[in-house]
Amino acid sequence: MKRMRFVCIVALTFALIFSGLSLSGQALEKGKSTLVIIHYKADPNATKDWNLWLWANGPDYFPNKAHAFNGEDAYGKIAAYEFPVDQPEKIGFIVRDDNWNKDGGSENDRFITKDMIKNGVAEIWIESGSKNISTVNPSNGADVENIDTNIHYYRYDNDYEKYGVWSWPEEQDGKRFEFDKQDEFGAVAKVTLDNPTKARLAGVIPHLEGWSEKDGADRFFYAGAKDIWLIEGDQTVYYSCLLYTSPSPRD
């Protein structure tokens, strides 16, 4: 039997980006992967539909591919992707469109180098027309001081009764949030947390009330994300979704 299933293509994994690959395979784990977050301030007069060409070197586990921007904040567009390699020597990027027109500043390859990666997070700020790469947050962390994220969660049996999520800013206290509504993907919980230390990551665990059951190990997501998508049994955090039909692993 086949059922409709959402596959979230973002984030943070090369196996699914712009491809039809299934969700089977090694889950990404904190401490074994690198979260790449690129903040991009576009030229307000630009007419091109820019995206990012990204690749990792040393070891080269991540093939060259186009990656869409999948978020936005006060600074500009955001692209957040998790590379399945811990502490790569460098991560290359080019701002370009699908016809390989390059944005100003991207005439030559640019790199996030190993010294820019802190605690598994490679986060930079760039601006159209400039070759400069900054690791200094222009908001001084105000962009994550208040976590406000919709957690979309899919279970194969569609049974969300007594399920909720435990969420916390990294290395801080957390609390439970209920799935109080559903959408066409599954159940939705609104996570709102104060983040006084301005941690760039937050944790999440889907679990049954009373902790008699939980879905996998701790997952971590970018604390500035407005929406993330989780799938039962899959450790990957996704930041956008695509609906397609595939056999359920439980069929």
Image (spheres, rainbow, N blue to C red):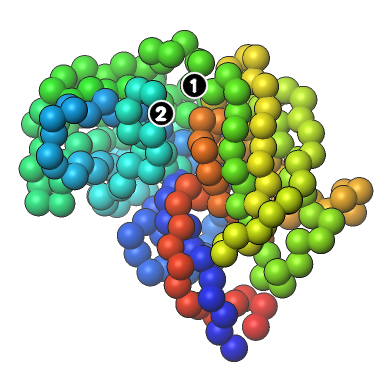
Residue 106 percent location from the top left of the image: 14, 31
CB atoms at circles 2 and 1 under 8 Å apart? yes
Question: In percent of the image, x 54 and y 71: which residue is there?
Answer: 5
Q: Which mark is residue 143?
A: 1
Amino acid on which the number 2 mark rests in the picture: Asp
Amino acid on which the number 1 mark rests in the picture: Asp
Q: Residue furthest bottom?
A: 1
Quadrant of the rendering where the N terminus is positioned? bottom right
Question: In percent of the image, x 26 and y 35: which residue is there?
Answer: 92
User: Would you call the spot at circle 2 few (<14 residues within 10 Å), some (14-19), or many (20 or more)?
Assistant: some
Displayed quadrant of residue 9: bottom left
Q: Secondary structure at mark 2?
A: loop
Q: Secondary structure at mark 1?
A: helix
Measured Cα–Cα span from mark 2 to mark 1:
8 Å
Residue 2 versus residue 64 in the image, above or below: below
Q: Which mark is residue 73?
A: 2
Mark 2 or mark 1: whose residue is earlier in sequence: 2
Question: Which of 127 and 72 lies nearest the eye of the viewer?
Answer: 72
From the viewer's perspective, is 50 left or right of 187?
left
Residue 222 percent location from the top left of the image: 52, 34
Question: In percent of the image, x 50 and y 15: which residue is there?
Answer: 141
Residue 238 versus residue 248 in the image, above or below: above
Q: Is residue 58 visible?
A: no
Residue 31 percent location from the top left of the image: 57, 36
